[in-house]
Amino acid sequence: TSGGSGGTSTTVTTLDELTSAVEGSDSKIVIISGTITGNDVVRVGSNTTVLGAAGASLEGVGLRVYQESNVIIRNIAISKVLAEAGDAIGIQEASQVWVDHVDLSSDMDHDKDYYDGLLDITHGSNGVTVTNSKLHDHWKASLVGHSDSNGDEDVAITVTYANNWWTNLNSRTPSFRFGTGHIYNNYYESNSDGINTRDGAQLLVENNVFVSVDKPLYSVDEEGYAVSNGNDFGDGEDTADAGTFTTAPYDYDLLDATEVAASVMASAGATLSF
């Protein structure tokens, strides 16, 4: 996934500028500077890199990758996107999308439907990678797979979550339907729910750490599956049915579980400088 590498570079400071800059399929790099506010979700075109300059944020403004490919979203804080607008980041019918070093949050002062998802990946999206990110202070964090009746489309989903910090979340860390997922070296802290594998999903769950999570890895109605290696489940346990996805189709560096908390907390979120 190369995003907008080699394309034009544009710095934006307003919602209108952002909306215009990320349109279309030409290669482009869009740098967000400062804080952009609103109540909207912005469509990101193919062959695009969206970067946050140091300290950049979107407040009430989400990003959507819909029927696009080759997109990178990095180093941006997105907060408090209302449900009437959409998800903080929504990826639908898309391929080759890399989300890296983002900080996604809202608050838990309202009911669970006041905001939608922080990072939802649905409608057969594939080749999606989420790394070095912090998801926190939210009811419904990350949904993979649109609905229980959407298996024909969502079985194609492939997602990797690595080196992310999930903290103070109620559910969906993630909730994974139908597709195939690789979840490794994540740090889970003070969440009401854990990894939920369901509707035939096949997960490979490796060297994650869970602190104060009641159900760190489980299946719903015995219809979700996982292979679990090297995890520290804290006071919880793995109750998911045994899966068949045992080897990821790429090379990767795997930290020992004893190293995960310190490594993730030191780098996850919008911590880069551009």
Image (cartoon, rainbow, N blue to C red):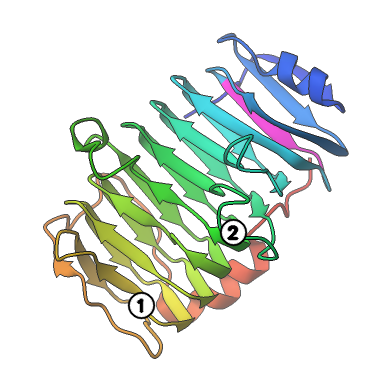
For residue 156, the mark is none
Q: Secondary structure at mark 2?
A: strand
Could you say where residue 232 lies in the image, as x and y percent from the top left? 37, 82
Q: Amino acid at mark 2?
A: Leu
Residues at circles 2 and 1 in contact by the CB criterion of under 8 Å:
no
Span shown in magenta: 48-53
Q: Which residue is mark 1?
A: 215
Which corner quadrant of the image does residue 228 belong to? Answer: bottom left
Identify the residue at image location x=73%, y=55%. Answer: 271
Q: Residue at x 53, y 48 (%)?
A: 117
Dominant secondary structure of the residues highlighted in magenta in the image: strand
* Residue 49 shown in magenta: yes
Label 2 to label 1, Cα distance in Å?
A: 18 Å
The 10 Å Cα crowd at callout 2, few under 14, some 14 to 19, many 20 or more, is many
Instruction: Point out the image quarter for the C terminus.
Output: top right
Q: Is residue 121 left or right of residue 53?
A: left
Is residue 257 shown above or below 25? below
Which residue shows up at 26% across the image and 72% down it? 229
Q: Residue at x 34, y 77 (%)?
A: 231
Foreground pick, 62 / 249: 62
x, y percent for residue 79: 71, 49
Q: Is 38 drawn above or below residue 7 in the view shown? A: below
**207 in relation to 13, above or below:** below
Q: Amino acid at mark 1?
A: Lys
Magenta-drawn stretch contains 250: no
Please give the residue where the numbered disc 2 appears in the rendered image. 135
